């Protein structure tokens, strides 16, 4: 029939099976047969020749400006808000005199160690409480951890006699 789309021959597979014929997908798009790039440019030039010079020039300029603005935004977008603020690190320095004795130095070090131990004890108690709330046997876990520390050979350092934490 004249209006039917063209049918291409059915391919035959090696096994001897035949796949049914299928029409080409572009055959249903009859509107594309009259389209050509040179014809489009010719129509554009004809429209510009028929009208007043400013009548078509302003919309064309606006269209180009809008498109250029959108492309500029695409270009600038990766460069905006990419800086991440990094706060400056503050380092506190304590100044000591050169005439400090070894005992004073050790006393200061033990005071710092006492503060660290207090913080560690506080953290450990919080973890124990969390473990209890989760239903864990924290005493058993603590006994196993102490046994593992002894097996590694870790020992508690003796504290000086007059140290007040």
Image: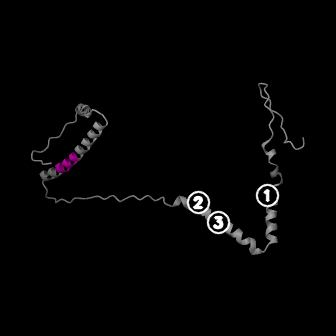
Front residue of 36/96: it is: 36
Question: Tag 3's secondary structure?
Answer: helix
Q: Is residue 62 magenta?
A: no
Q: Position of residue 41 (x, y in %)?
A: 79, 62
From mark 1 to mark 3, how far is it between C-alphas? 24 Å
| Residue located at (81% from left, 51% from top) | 31
The residue singled out by tag 1 in the image is 37
Q: Say few, some or many: other residues with alpha carbon within 10 Å of mark 2 (under 14 / 14 to 19 / 20 or more).
A: few
Decide: is 57 above or below 112: below
102 left or right of 83 in image: left
Q: Earlier in the sequence, mark 3 or mark 2?
A: 3
Find residue 77 and report its image quarter.
bottom right
Question: Tag 1's secondary structure?
Answer: helix
| Residue located at (74% from left, 75% from top) | 54
105 left or right of 149 in image: left
Q: Position of residue 78 (x, y in %)?
A: 53, 58
The residue singled out by tag 2 in the image is 74
Q: Magenta segment range?
A: 109-118
For residue 66, the mark is 3
Find residue 97 and report its image quarter.
bottom left
From mark 2 to mark 1, how far is it between C-alphas? 28 Å
> For the N terminus, which image quadrant?
top right
Q: Check the image and tell me how it is coloured.
A: one colour
Q: Earlier in the sequence, mark 1 or mark 3?
A: 1
Question: Tag 2's secondary structure?
Answer: helix
| Residue located at (81% from left, 34% from top) | 21
Q: Earlier in the sequence, mark 2 or mark 1?
A: 1
């Amino acid at each position: 029939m004249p209006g039917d789309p063209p049918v291409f021959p059915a391919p035959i597979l090696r096994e001897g099976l035949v796949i049914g014929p299928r029409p080409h997908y572009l055959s249903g798009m009859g509107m594309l047969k009259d389209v050509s790039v040179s014809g489009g440019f010719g129509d554009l030039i004809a429209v510009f020749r028929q009208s007043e010079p400013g009548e078509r020039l302003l919309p064309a300029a606006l269209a180009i400006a809008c498109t250029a603005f959108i492309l500029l935004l695409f270009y600038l977008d990766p460069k905006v808000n990419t800086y991440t603020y990094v706060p400056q690190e503050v380092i506190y320095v304590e100044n000591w005199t050169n005439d400090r004795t070894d005992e004073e130095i050790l006393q200061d070090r033990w005071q710092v160690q006492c503060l660290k131990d207090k913080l560690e004890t506080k953290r450990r108690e919080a973890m124990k409480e969390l473990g209890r709330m989760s239903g864990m046997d924290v005493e058993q876990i603590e006994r196993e951890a102490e046994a593992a520390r002894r097996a590694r050979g870790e020992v508690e350092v003796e504290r000086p006699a007059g140290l007040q934490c």
